[in-house]
Image (tube, rainbow, N blue to C red):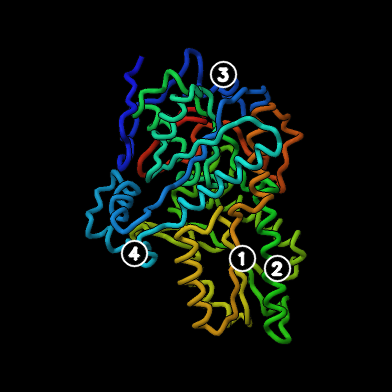
Amino acid sequence: MAAVNLGPTRGRKPAPAASAPCAPGAIVPGATPAAQSGPEHVTEPVAYDAILLAGFGGPEGQDDVIPFLRNVTSGRGIPDERLEEVAHHYRHFGGVSPINEQNRALKAALEAELSSRGVDLPVLWGNRNWDPYLNDALAEARSAGYTKLIAIATSAYSSYSSCRQYREDFADALADTGLGDEIQIDKVRQFFDHPGFVQPFIEGVREGIARLEASVEGLDRTTQVEVLFATHSIPSTDAAKSGPAERGFGEGGAYAAQHLAVAEVVMREAGASDVPWQLVYQSRSGPPSMPWLEPDINDAIEELPAAGRKAVVIVPLGFVSDHMEVLWDLDNEALETAEAHGLTAVRVPTPGTHPAYVAGLVDLVLERVNGTPVADRPAVTELGPWYDVCRPGCCENVRLGFRPALAGIAP
């Protein structure tokens, strides 16, 4: 049995795991027995002990900013001088990212929703890159005697950074604590097209267009308004590897296909099928020599006046809450770009703690608790319901290759 390490972990991101725990005969490392054989959808009920809410993490003071960015970029050898160049977003807000407070609010909302339904499942919270870390959450689970965890990652889509990297960090945390022989971790399916996640955006687009029509006299929504669905840009090579290769999603992989499918549903259900829209990207951070998904939202905004647009609705479709890249890249940079080009702009809310979103996350947990048949699982696009167990080769990081990860078939 591996040595258990439950000492203080504040300020320490776990080192990469050399391997992931795998029961004899299992092909899914670190999974509960129901998932170990690797079914696409687990329809066997599982008596989970607790929910693991897995966040990205963020600094909560000026002194935290550089250590946090070191964690985010660990293994890439980026000197502090360069990290300081990108720290100004956090410095602008006093060194405090809103993401931790948002996850505290989401945790409380999940606990209230579970209680209202009579579901006795505690919610543990751990972050990938800042306190409380995932290994802290696993230490808490061990102290309470919890051995079967169902994880909710605060990211809805399929890509390395939005799914597989969370799964790698689960493996890292188990290795760091030495709890691989004691704790099993499954993960809810990617929820990009679950109605609970999509409903807040439907409402936001409907209300955003109505606000523009009320504020801009004589506005023709069919020719003068454009809806920009914004998500985080990722390297084009990683995008092409997102999702299982056998699905054949093409150049943008499952990542782009999922966003496009959801955006189409949002426009239809918002009663806005007559309004022009496009998918745009934000927050790229790689070197200029590396292709990332485009167009950048600011470039797209700059082109709107030439197309006759007078107003724009910005929809943060790739984000679950108003964290730093929403507050800075959209509320600061994108809105300033719109103003500079004479466009009236509104930015619609992220799901946050919207009741439909919170209820939807609980529904996703109960799918696995109850072993819900696939035919009874809601999905608003033809791409879903997505897999409970990630498929082989899914969401490879081309630069790093495959590292040990849980909740999916190895590699």
**Three-letter amino acid code at the position of disc 3:** Pro
Dividing the image into 4 quarters, which one contains the N terminus? top left
Instruction: Give the mark nearest the N terminus, 4 or 2.
Output: 4
Label placed on residue 91: 4
Q: CA–CA distance between discs 4 and 2?
A: 32 Å
Instruction: Give the mark nearest the N terminus, 1 or 2.
Output: 2
Q: Residue at x 60, y 62 (%)?
A: 349
Q: Residue at x 59, y 41 (%)?
A: 190
Q: Nearer the viewer, mark 3 or mark 4?
A: 4
Whether residues under marks 4 and 2 lie with C-beta atoms below 8 angstroms apart, the answer is no
Instruction: Give the mark nearest the N terminus, 4 or 1.
Output: 4
From the viewer's perspective, is residue 259 above or below residue 406?
below
Instruction: Give the mark nearest the N terminus, 3 or 1.
Output: 3
The residue that mark 2 highlights is: 207
The residue that mark 1 highlights is: 348
Q: Nearer the viewer, mark 3 or mark 1?
A: 1
Q: CA–CA distance between discs 3 and 2?
A: 46 Å
Q: x, y percentage for residue 234?
A: 45, 54
Badge 2 local density, few (<14 within 10 Å), some, or many (20+)? Answer: some
**Three-letter amino acid code at the position of disc 4:** Arg
**Three-letter amino acid code at the position of disc 1:** Val
The residue that mark 3 highlights is: 33
Dividing the image into 4 quarters, which one contains the C terminus? top left
Q: CA–CA distance between discs 3 and 4?
A: 46 Å
Element type where label 3 sits in the image = loop
